[in-house]
């Protein structure tokens, strides 16, 4: 499997060499170049073109024959992990206007559909199916029926909740109390899914939900975790935490707490364990939906896709610093071990 670093090295040079000015070419061809807008909740206001996620999207387009600045125009918008920026970004894209919006979180997806009921919205791992159905954005996986389609985060309500707990317990068998760090509005309403409740009972674990809604709430949250005397931390899948991941990782290291995260970028930055979907694959696959819609397909007729690949990354340097010996059986299952 090609990891994130290899992917960047392979596609980096060719993607960024593409010219970004489309005006002259449009005038020569006499045709309108389709415009695609992106709302990336955890990226800077003007996302860097050398970012791995941007590269993944651009390479996906190239595979379908679309080149930014030649036969397609891409508008990047980033909220830097601040959900209050999303409504304005969505309205800005609708006002341009764009032909399609791509959203990578549930919050950005909701704002895109609120800003326009007619512009197709393609998900790039933005939500699970029950959340879409509750929001009235999809009737079924096979035929969503509205203006939203794309790659799901998952089919079920938080099916990985139990998996995170199992991996954490396997890596640190003595763990009994786990702090669950979450941030609204990115976390789906049910913190305790049926699978999570069963896993807590089977693994003899107690879960302590700890909310962080803004950067100035981290100190309060960390103090609550200290007072509760937890043994480990699980970090929820929030773009807000991506923006502040170093702060969380450093806290876990200071308190000597094993922690598990939802994206490999945390392990790359010093987090103990990460487990989640392969975001490079998800982003590239999302562009195939854009291609089909631009070629005339209706988003409501395009089946929703479930992620196919999950990555388990273990940082052995962090494990050693915590005094943990990761079982060989867990190391053998890892897609990457950082030493």
Image (cartoon, helix red, strand yellow):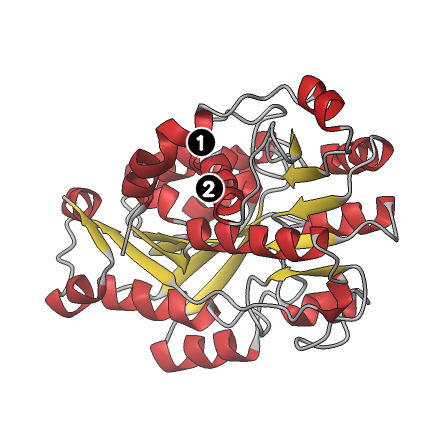
Local packing at callout 2 (Cα closer than 10 Å; few below 14, some 14-19, many 20+) is many
Give the x, y percent position of residue 119.
82, 49
Q: Is residue 171 placed above or below 281 in the rendered structure? A: below
User: Could you tell me how far apart the alpha carbons at marks 2 and 1 are, in whole angstroms?
Assistant: 7 Å
Which residue is the site of mark 2? 59
**In the rendered image, is residue 10 in sight?**
yes
Give the x, y percent position of residue 139.
77, 75
Nearer to me, 287 or 39: 287
Q: Is residue 152 placed above or below 51 in the rendered structure? A: below
Which residue is the site of mark 1? 15
**Disc 2 or 1, which lies upstream in sequence?**
1
Identify the image quadrant of the N terminus.
Answer: bottom left
Identify the image quadrant of the C terminus.
Answer: top left
| Residue drawn at point x = 40 percent, y = 33 percent | 246
Nearer to me, 157 or 108: 108
| Marks 2 & 1, CB-CB < 8 Å contact | yes
| Residue drawn at point x = 34 percent, y = 58 percent | 311
């Amino acid at each position: 499997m090609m990891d994130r670093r290899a992917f960047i090295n392979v596609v980096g040079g060719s993607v960024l060499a593409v010219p970004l000015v489309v005006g002259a070419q449009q005038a020569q061809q006499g045709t309108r170049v389709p415009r695609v807008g992106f709302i990336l909740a955890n990226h800077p206001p003007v996302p860097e073109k050398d970012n791995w996620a941007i590269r993944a999207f651009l390479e996906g387009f190239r595979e379908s024959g679309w080149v930014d600045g030649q036969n397609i125009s891409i508008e990047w918008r980033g909220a830097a992990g601040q959900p209050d920026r999303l409504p304005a970004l969505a309205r800005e894209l609708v006002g341009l206007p764009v032909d399609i919006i791509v959203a990578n979180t549930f919050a950005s997806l909701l704002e895109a559909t609120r800003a326009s009921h007619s512009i197709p919205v393609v998900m790039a791992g933005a939500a699970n199916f029950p959340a879409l159905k509750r929001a009235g954005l999809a009737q079924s996986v096979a035929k969503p029926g509205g203006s939203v389609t794309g790659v799901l985060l998952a089919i079920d309500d938080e099916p990985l909740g139990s998996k995170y707990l199992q991996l954490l317990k396997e890596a640190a068998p003595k763990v009994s109390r786990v702090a669950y760090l979450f941030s609204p509005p990115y976390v789906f309403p049910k913190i305790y899914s049926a699978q999570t409740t069963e896993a807590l009972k089977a693994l003899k674990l107690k879960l302590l939900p700890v909310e962080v809604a803004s950067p100035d709430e981290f100190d309060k949250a960390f103090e609550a975790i200290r007072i509760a005397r937890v043994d480990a931390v699980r970090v929820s899948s929030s773009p807000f935490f991506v923006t502040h991941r170093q702060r969380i990782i450093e806290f876990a290291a200071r308190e000597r707490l094993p922690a598990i995260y939802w994206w490999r970028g945390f392990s790359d930055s010093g987090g103990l364990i990460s487990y989640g979907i392969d975001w490079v694959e998800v982003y590239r696959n999302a562009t195939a939906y854009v291609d089909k819609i631009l070629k005339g397909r209706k988003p409501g007729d395009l089946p929703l896709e479930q992620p196919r690949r999950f990555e388990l990354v273990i940082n052995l340097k962090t494990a050693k610093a915590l005094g943990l010996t990761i079982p060989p059986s867990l190391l053998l299952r890892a897609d990457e071990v950082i030493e």
